[in-house]
């Protein structure tokens, strides 16, 4: 059991480091002393409530953080720039998460440029999970029955087995980064 607890602590430590948090910063956000937090990391005795708070803080699936197995998204998860987390932290964690968890099949990040005059993308499906981060302009991620508008710094993480496509919205070119893990 101790090794399982230690693995949870290792995953939390990795998450904290990837998101560029010190032990003092994370302890402060959790409302506990730094000494207590360091004890959790070194002894592997995180209370379940603290693991849950960390999963919410970093937008990571609780089950994935506890078990180490990637959670499969049913639909999608959107993070808006400036809503609780800087997109650089989110981008850094999610890219590393995808690259680390799906080492058998991973595409390199693709930079996509969309013009306002481009025809709407055909709806496609594929296995795995997809992460899009808007770098410039506005992008509409179109699902079979809805359209989600993302602006600079917004990101979306979704299950691409649902028919989806992207198109430029607005009068200027849009650019987004996409990572697809199968």
Image: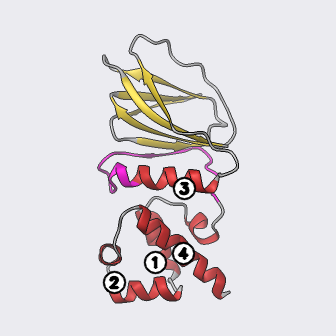
Q: Around disc 2, counting alpha carbons within 10 Å, would you say few (fewer than 14), some (14 to 19), or many (20 or more)?
A: few
Indicate the quadrant where residue 32 lies.
bottom left
Residue under label 3: 97
Q: Which residue is mark 1?
A: 50
**Residue 171: percent from left, percent from top:** 31, 16
Q: Reply yes or no: does residue 177 show up in magenta.
A: no
Query: In which quadrant is the C terminus drawn?
Result: top right
Identify the residue at image location x=60%, y=77%: 7
Q: Earlier in the sequence, mark 2 or mark 1?
A: 2
**Which secondary structure dominates the residues rendered in magenta?**
loop
Segment colored magenta: 70-89
Q: Which residue is mark 2?
A: 32
Q: Are marks 4 and 1 in contact (CB under 8 Å)?
A: no
Percent across and percent down for residue 5 are 60, 82
> CB of mark 1 within 8 Å of CB of mark 3?
no
Disc 4 target residue = 10
- Separation of disc 2 and disc 3 at Cα? 27 Å
Near-viewer residue (74 or 23): 23
Helix, strand or loop at mark 3: helix
């Amino acid at each position: 059991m101790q090794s399982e607890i230690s693995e949870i602590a290792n995953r939390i430590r990795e998450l904290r480091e990837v998101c560029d948090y010190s032990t003092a910063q994370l302890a402060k956000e959790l409302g506990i002393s730094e000494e207590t937090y360091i004890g959790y990391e070194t002894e592997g005795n995180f209370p379940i409530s603290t693991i849950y708070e960390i999963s919410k803080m970093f937008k990571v699936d609780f089950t994935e953080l506890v078990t180490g197995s990637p959670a499969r998204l049913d639909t999608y998860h959107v993070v808006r720039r400036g809503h609780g987390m800087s997109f650089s932290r989110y981008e850094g964690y999610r890219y590393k998460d995808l690259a680390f968890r799906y080492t058998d099949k991973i595409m390199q990040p693709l930079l996509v440029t969309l013009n306002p005059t481009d025809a709407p993308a055909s709806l496609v499906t594929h296995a795995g999970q997809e992460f899009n981060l808007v770098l410039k302009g506005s992008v509409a991620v179109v699902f079979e029955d809805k359209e989600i508008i993302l602006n600079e710094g917004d990101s979306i993480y979704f299950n691409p087995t649902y028919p989806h496509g992207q198109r430029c919205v607005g009068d200027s070119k849009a650019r987004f980064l996409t990572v697809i893990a199968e």
